[in-house]
Amino acid sequence: MTNKKISLIFLLLFLSIIITGCINEQTENSDQINVDEEKYEYSDTIPTGTDTIYQFSVIDALLEGVYDGEMNCGELKTRGDFGLGTFDNLNGEMLELEGVIYQVRADGNVCEINDSETSPFAVVTFFENDIEKNLDKKMTGQQVAAHIEELLPSRNIMYAIKINGEFEYMKTRSVAAQEKPYPRLIEVTEDQSVFEFNDTKGTIVGYWMPEYIEGINVPGYHLHFITEDRTGGGHVLDYTLTSGTIEIDRSDRFYLELPENENYLSKGFSADTEDELEEAEN
Ligand code: ZN
């Protein structure tokens, strides 16, 4: 063997040591990322396990009149089996319960929605009960709201809220499909349809969000309702509970997906929408 050949072998050996070293280092690094595989189930890299709230679009876009449906309901069901939102053109209130998506139309009718229908704004999660409380005395919606807030372990995380019960009174609203150019949400809700139910059974589906979510979602409560027989419901405005069960799903993960349609991309959002949100949602 010539000296040249020997030095080439040494060089190759040296290089392979460096490369192996690098690989080992990488392996060590990836070992340090501790992924709780049971908690996360990935669908197209979107975490869809429990304790994750998935949201499509932001509430400020809805306030500005971005009503073009983009997320289809079939896909939405892969992100959660429980939630709320609205439909293409703002056509009614959306409620998802046990994996079924319902539409409460402006005429009060309720129907199950096909997977091909689309939504401009929706918030869903795989509901898993973490905190449960039975209520057996009559309470107003405000009393229930205050009671739930006492049950929340912290005001700094997010919660999905489910209330199954009998209601002495329930007042909801829905909105009609809009035409382009879309009016702002505050103008639409001036003409909203209001429904009142007396002595009805049903389920409230919704969220409690922290103050810092302003602009993205609704701080505090956002609740929708559906009757047990699935013939009525809507966005909750007021109620009196006779008895029922509160279930709370604490969520410390939030996944936000934004629309790509021109309507969304070209809109300027107002900096301060707090008052408008209050008027449009309550
Ligand atoms: Zn609503």
Image (cartoon, rainbow, N blue to C red):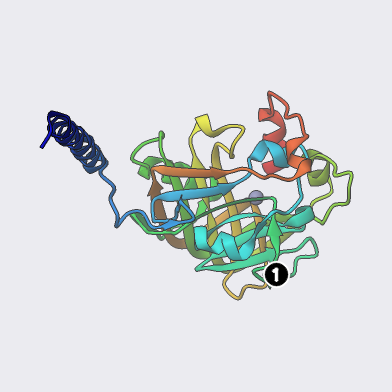
Q: What percent of the width, then of the height, locates residue 94?
A: 65, 59
Residue highlighted by disc 1:
110
Q: In this view, does 233 lie to the left or right of 153?
A: right
Does residue 242 appear anywhere in the picture?
Answer: no
Looking at the picture, tell me which residue is in the foreground, 238 or 280.
280
Density class for disc 1 (Cα within 10 Å; few <14, some 14-19, many ≥20) is many
Q: Which residue is drawn at 71% across and 57% down?
A: 87
Write the residue at 44% across / 46% down: 159
Asked if residue 199 is positioned above or below residue 80 in the image, the reply reads below
The residue positioned farthest toward the bottom in the image shown: 229
**Callout 1: SS:** strand
Quadrant showing the N terminus: top left
Look at the image and tell me whether residue 268 can be seen: yes
As drawn, 37 above or below 33: below
Quadrant for the C terminus, please.
top right
Residue 93 lies in quadrant: bottom right
Is the CB atom of the residue marked by disc 1 within 8 angstroms of ligand 1's nearest atom? no
From the viewer's side, name the closer residue of 243 and 103. 103
All told, the count of numbered labels is 1
**Displayed quadrant of residue 265:** top right
Mark 1: which amino acid? Val
| Residue located at (46% from left, 43% from top) | 254
Q: Residue furthest left?
A: 1
The residue drawn where x is 50% and y is 40% is 209
Asked if 254 appears above or below 225 in the picture, the reply is: above
Q: Hey, which residue is sitting farthest top in the picture?
A: 271
Percent of width and height locating residue 170 = 63, 58
The spot of residue 255 in percent (x, y) is 49, 44
Q: In which quarter of the image is residue 183?
A: top right
Q: Where is residue 42 in the image (x, y as percent from the top left)?
A: 42, 56
